[in-house]
Image (cartoon, coloured by chain):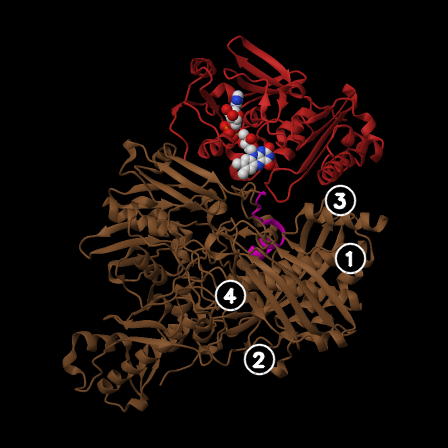
Chain colours: A red, B brown
Amino acid sequence: MKPAAFEYVRPKNLAEALTLLAEGQGDSKVKAGGQSLGPMLNMRLSRVNQLVDISLIPELKTVSDDSDTIIIGACITHASIEDGKIPDVTNGMMNSVAAGIAYRAIRNQGTIGGSLAHADPSADWVISLTAAGAEAVISGPNGERRVGLNQFMDSAFETKLDFDDILTAVRIPKFSKQARWGYYKFCRKTGDFAEAMSAVVIDPSRDYCRVVIGATDTHPVVITDAIDLLTSDEAIDACITKNALDLNPLSGQMHRTALRRCIKQVQSL
Amino acid sequence: MVSNARSNKGVGGRLLRKEDDRYLRGRGQFVADIKMSGMKEVAFLRSPLAHARINAITIPENLKHKAFCWSNMSGVKAICAMTSLAGFKKSEQSPLASDKVRHVGELVAMCVGDNRAQAEDFLEELVVDFDELPAIVDMVSAQQKGAVLVHEDWGDNVYLESKWDGDLSEAKANASITVTRQIRTNRQCMAPIEGKGVVAYWDNRMDQLVLYTSTQMPHIVRTGLAECLNLSQANVRIISPDVGGAFGYKGILTPEEICLGWLAMECGHPVRWIEDRREHLTANANCREHEYQVTAYADDIGRILGLEAVGAVNAGAYSAYPFSACLEGAQVASILPGPYIVPAYQCNINSISSNKPPILPYRGVARTSVCFAMELMIDAIARKVGREPYEVRLENLVPPTAMPYTNITGKAFDSGDYPESLRRAVESINLKGIRERQATNEKDGRRIGIGFCTFCEQGAHGTSVYHAWGVPMIPGQEQAVARLTPDGSLELRIGAHSHGQSMETTLAQVANEILGIDPADVRLVHGDTQYTPYSTGTWGSRCAVMSGGAVSTACKALAERAAKIAAHLMKLDLKEVQIIDGQAKGAASSISLAEIAEAWYYKPQILAADVDPGGLEVTVGYRPKIDTGTFSYASHAVVVAVDTELGHVEILDYVIVEDGGTMINPMVVDGQVFGGAAQGIGTALYEEMPFDSVGQPLASTLADYLLPGPTEIPAFRIEHMETPSPNTEFGVKGIGESGAIGPPAAIANAINDALAPIGVEVLETPVTPRRILAAIAEAQAGAQS
Ligand SMILES: Cc1cc2nc3c(=O)[nH]c(=O)nc-3n(C[C@H](O)[C@H](O)[C@H](O)COP(=O)(O)OP(=O)(O)OC[C@H]3O[C@@H](n4cnc5c(N)ncnc54)[C@H](O)[C@@H]3O)c2cc1C
């Protein structure tokens, strides 16, 4: 399992990286932590002419504050967030989620941007940050744009990113003191990808209540006005059925349970 | 003459492992650490199809001399594992596929590159024209009339029918209850940390093919390799360096070894192949696929009157050398009764061929599946007669007063108190407390269950057992060489090989026990056919008994030689001299082994005229008094919490009461048991190698083949009993596989205990969340209808 040959370049800054991608005309690929891309290249499921390593670009490793939002650089690792090196604006949600991603060795390398760009419907950032109402900041040949994470994924492993785009940062709205969150994922073992997972964020001061269901076959299910789900188990069951998550009854059972337990976390606070 | 005074470094000593110094510093030398100038790397083209005819393989002109297929390997012979069991059908496995491929991952061609990536690039240029054939995947369709044949000349898909005939009429007539279950252990993989790896080159000076391979049995590989490559054994040297786990996977001759040996001769430069995890999982290291229907006839207190089983083992496409594809099937028939008194017994097991990789003997071999079946049956009987499962076990276990006991299939249990191991497990796990806890509801809504199993493990089986099998490698006398070096340290040579058994430590302890030499001054030479006596290798929990016995015997012979020299030097009668603490001691004087060695090697003029010319080097064979094997035994007890909404199982407590006879080093025994039990948990809950209906493997990385990790393994609580075997040196018994035998049974019993109140029973490994949820859904549907 060794990759087919490719060129490896390490641009110094974002502009250089964008130029390389544009010149590559689709045959160049960004490498961040390499934790998802590496195995795919090794198994020759993915091939590139040129690997553009962005993991050391300083602009992509910064954190900045924009009044009601925090902007986290795409190449910040899961481990930095787990270790509290990034200011927390989510009442502990992000630290907690980060600590539950894969294993420490992967968290040391894997990045928040890489995880979103990879767009696995079972990925922790995909589900939790969509629930938090975060936005992707994308730089491309025509400048910078923002896409809400609830719009970002088209389906499993498909996003609004073009071949010449780079996800540069994630904008995360600051939770108010009253905000509550719930997060539940069911894995067969520690570090395994989830069989079922759900996240909920309620922020009364912003009149915000969003539920996201992951581990789906396509993009995650996003329920933007989720207050009804908090009222009864029947509403939860109906939601699972409505979104066709119980076509396989056993999967349906797992989704239902994960969602119920996730919501219970905010109810019991 | 030899002192049995116990030092803390001898038999029974809790010595830290000698080998850990290099392992913990990352200085072990495994096959993949070997570098040679001019060495090139090999990659294999493996079949993408489970069953297909090969019409043509096209090697482009630019790859001539870099790419090879079977037609290039003229004169090389296929691997053919034989047994003399009546009715056995042999398979011929050419190292690269000849006319047909019979499983996904079978070797079709190979390329040699400057590095592995380049070799894989070359593979992409090869074109194979296949005609796909229907694939035989499951055991039922394999046995149907008119089924596609994996080996056309056989007429069916059965390697061997293994039968145990018995008369059950009395049992049936007298039984108050009858319990029947269909029980299955699914196919899984072995997953040692180090996969397989081979480095080969031709040594012109020695006129030898030198093949480094990660193997448990260097001598057997040499024999098999020489046969397949048409070399004399003198022209083949096998070196097995440090081995990072093997578990049976490396107890075979592999097609890759033959290919690399051939390439080394063909290309004239060193070649290496390091197995990757995908090859390991999808093509190579499969094991454990058994299914049987078992019926027990019992009285109203659960005493077994008779046992009947019919089933099959899916042995895959080829018969692995040397043990063959029917090792497991035949073992099932002979060991299903377990540690119990079974008055009447009948069993019929077919070893099936299919379009899956060959099934290989994984730690525990058939015992794990058999224990799973028998122990689930005991619990089913207990539920039917309304008793605690442990009570039903106690009714049926062979009691200590009956030892030594020969059971219905002729297994000669040597010693021990099987019921006591169970009583201790019941006590230690606090059955009473758990039953009380079960009467109250858990706060988190989970269901608590407690499960037990008791089993015995035949280990170190010898000549009579394997002669009856007719395999090509019948173990006889196990030899060891003991040599005192001129400075009085000790060199031991054995033909078996350590792949995690800690033999560098334990055999040094055996030597210490006999000679009093400090284990630090003992060097074990093993894993090289050039320097070691012939041995069938390390398998079947045999090395503590066989190599340990051989080293002990050799050291005793060496002690006698040393004592004779010493007596002459000390001017004493031989009877007055004892070898203790690395010295020859008389009543008032002593000389060290180093002085004795110095006299023998450097000052022959001071030796007696009739000194034994063999000097301070002996080669001695050993075989236990009774060679049908030692029987260690254990009881496992486990408490689980089952989440009935998600099907998740958490192990809350795990107790193992183990009797492996006299322990050479209790910490090493613990290590063996812990490691095995971790693997058993994998079998019980996580590990499965599923295939789709056309024989495609559905797990190809460790992301979809789940191994338990540190958070899934509980802190085992282990208790030892130490009943010596009457037949072996020091009373040692083999226990290397024990840990891996019990967990699936104990854990499934605990799950069933937790779920019995809602009418759920699981009968298949691994007990995954989906299997649990499906069983619950089925029980609910049954309750409603
Ligand atoms: C064994 C294992 C277990 C795992 N378990 C989990 C888990 O439990 N939960 C979980 O969420 N994840 C898990 N992961 C995935 C892990 O979190 C990865 O780190 C993450 O998915 C990808 O991040 P990366 O930085 O490594 O991206 P890379 O592997 O470098 O890239 C992934 C993809 O995204 C693209 N990309 C990366 N960065 C950018 C960017 N800034 N702009 C545009 N495109 C970009 C790449 O081109 C590539 O296509 C696991 C991975 C492994 C190997």
Q: CA distance from mark 2 to mark 1?
A: 35 Å
- Please tell me which of labels 2 and 3 falls first in the chain: 2
- Label 2 element class: strand
Disc 2 marks a residue whose amino acid type is Thr
- Please tell me which of labels 1 and 3 falls first in the chain: 3
Disc 4 marks a residue whose amino acid type is Val
- Left or right of residue B230: residue A141: right
Among all residues in the image, which is located at the extreme top? A142
Q: Residue at x 54, y 49 (%)?
A: B148
- Left or right of residue B632: residue A253: right
- Ligand 1 under 8 Å from disc 2 Cβ: no
Residue ID for mark 3: B645
Disc 1 marks a residue whose amino acid type is Ala
Q: Are marks 4 and 3 in contact (CB under 8 Å)?
A: no
In the image, residue B283 above or below residue B505 = above
- Please tell me which of labels 4 and 1 falls first in the chain: 4
Q: CA distance from mark 4 to mark 3?
A: 39 Å
- Label 4 element class: helix
Image mark 4: chain: B
In the image, residue A119 above or below residue B189 = above
**Camera-side residue of B314 and B564:** B314
- Label 3 element class: loop
Q: Residue at x 58, y 49 (%)?
A: B688
Rendering quarter of residue B519: bottom left
Residue A34, given in percent of the width and then of the height, sits at 48, 30
